[in-house]
Amino acid sequence: MQPKEYQQLVQEHLPPRPIVKNMLWAFFVGGLICTIGQVVLTIAQSYERTKNEAAAVTLAAMILLGTILTALGVYDEIAEKAGAGAAVPITGFANTVTSAAMDFRREGFLLGMGSKMFIIAGPVIVYGILSGFIVALIKSLVLGLL
Amino acid sequence: MDNRLGTSTLTFSKGPRITSRYTLVGPMEGKGPHALDFHEILSDDSLGQKTAEKTERLMLELAITKTLEQHGTRIKDVQFLIAGDLLNQITTSNLAASTHTAPFIGIYGACSTFAEALGLGAVLLQGGFANQVLIGTASHYQTAERQFRYPIELNVQHLSTNQVTVTGAAAAILSFAERGPRITHATFGSVVDMGLKDPHDMGSAMAPAAFQTIQQHLADTQRTLADYDIVITGDLGKQGSKMLRLLLEREGCSGLERLQDGGSQIFGDWQSVGSGGSGAACIAVMTLGYVLNCLESAKAKRVLVVATGALLSALTVLQGESIPCIAHAIALEQ
C-alpha cells in the first residue's frame, strides 16, 4: 500500500471529535472561572480606590487560584474536560508557568526551573507583545491619517 | 544460514526458554483488568524517589533483582544483560546496568524494545554465546510525558487517539533450563514509514509496521494467524488495532479473532486513557504477565508477540519529520 493511500485510510477511520460536548464544557467551565473573577473584582472594587487597582487585585487572585489548583494536581483534570475553557482564562496561563516550574524543579532552581519555567508560556508572551505592537501601530497609523 | 526461515525469520532449534520472569506495574495499571497477571503492584508511582527518572531506574533494578532471585541465579552467572527504555540515551537502563557486573547490551526500539531484547537473547543462546541471558525494560508515565510531550500538570485536553505511557518494569531470564515457554521464532521487522506525522496518533502510524512484520512472519513460517492461540500486538492501542485489522482484512487474512493488543487491554475502559497504554513496559509486562500466564495455565499453546515501536523523537516531530515505525515478532510455545 502506498503511503498516500494509507494516510487517506487513516483519515477515514479517525474517531470523530466530540465537538459539541467539548464546546459545552468549555463554555460552562470557562464561564465559571470568569464568574469567580467577576465576584473577586466586585469585592475588590468595594475597597480599592480605582478600577485599575481592583483589576490588579483580581488578576493576582486568579493567578493564585490557578497556581494552587495546579500544585494540587487538579487543574489538568479540569482542563481534560474543559479544554479551552480552562486554557484561555488567566488561570490557564498561571497553570502553564506553574506546571513547567514543577516539572523542571528536578533539574535544579537555576538551569531547571529558572530557565524552563516559561517553556510553554514563553510563546504566548512573545506573540502577545508582537501582536499588541502591530495592532498599536495600525491604530496610530489610522488615527494619524484621519 | 541454517537457522533462518524464508527471508527474515530466525528459528531457535536449541529451544531457549523464558525460565524466570518478574513484572511490576504502577497503581493505575494495578487497577486495570490484568492486575492479577502482574507480580507486583506499586502502591505509589514514586517509590519514595525524588524524581520519576530515579523511580524508573529503581523499578528496573527491582525487576532484575527479583527475576534473579526467582531463578536462584546470581548476576555473575549471567553472560549478558540486555536492556532498553524510552529515555534519551537509554539512561534508565545504563544506570540500572551500572549496578551489575554482567556485560551489558543497551538497545532502543521504543515500545518494541522488549521483543528486540527477547529476540537478541534467544540469538545469543542459540549461537552458543551464552547459557543465561537477562533481559529487562521499564517505562514511567511521568518521564515519558516530560520527554515526549508536556509538563505533567499542564492543561491539555487529550484526544481519543492519545495513548498513556505505562508505568512499570519487567525482566526475564532466558536459558535452557527445563521450564517456562520456548522461544521458537523471531522475526525482526524493518522500519516502515507511511508518512504519518501526528504524535497524538501513534497507533495508526505503527499499524503498517505490525502488518508488515506479521505478514513476513506468516510467509516465512508458512503459518496463518489461526496457528496461534493468541497474536498479541504491543501498544497499537484501540485506534492502531482498528487500522491493523483493516490492513489484514484487505489482504484477505483469516484468523483475525486471534488478535489482541497489549495497549488496548492493559487499562480498562473506565480508566479514560484514550486509545490505551503504550511505553516500553507495556508489552513487556503484558507478555511476561498475561501471555505467559496463559501459556502456563494451558489456556494457550502457541503465541505470537508482535511488539511495535514509534521511532520518533520530540525534536523530529517539531521539525516536521514523519514517524518511522518498527515491529518485531516473537513466537512462544508451551
Image (tube, coloured by chain):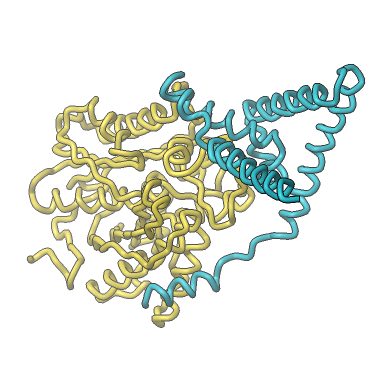
Name the quadrant of the N terminus of chain A. Answer: bottom left
Please give the name of the residue rendered at 12% of the width and 53% of the height, measured from the top-left corner.
B126
Total number of numbered discs in the rendering? 0
Snapshot quadrant of residue A93:
top right
Pick the front one: B24 or A33: A33
Where residue B89 appears, as percent x and y from the top left, is 28, 38
Please give the name of the residue rendered at 43% of the width and 40% of the height, measured from the top-left corner.
B144
Where residue B222 appears, as percent x and y from the top left, is 25, 76
Please give the name of the residue rendered at 53% of the width and 32% of the height, measured from the top-left corner.
A118
Judge whether residue B297 can be spotted in this image.
no
Pick the front one: A62 or B174: A62
Pick the front one: B272 or B176: B272
Q: Residue furthest front?
A: A145
Snapshot quadrant of residue B213:
bottom left
Pick the front one: B115 or B257: B115
In the rendered structure, the answer to whether residue A45 lies left or right of residue B144 reads right
Determine whether B58 is above or below A3 in the image.
above
Where residue B250 appears, as percent x and y from the top left, is 43, 81
Judge whether residue B106 can be spotted in this image.
yes
Task: Please tell me the colour of chain A.
Answer: cyan
In the rendered structure, the answer to whether residue B332 lies left or right of residue A111 reads left
Q: Residue furthest right?
A: A46
Where residue B226 appears, as percent x and y from the top left, is 38, 73
Kindly indicate which chain is depicted in yellow in the rendered structure: B
Please give the name of the residue rendered at 35% of the width and 56% of the height, measured from the top-left corner.
B307
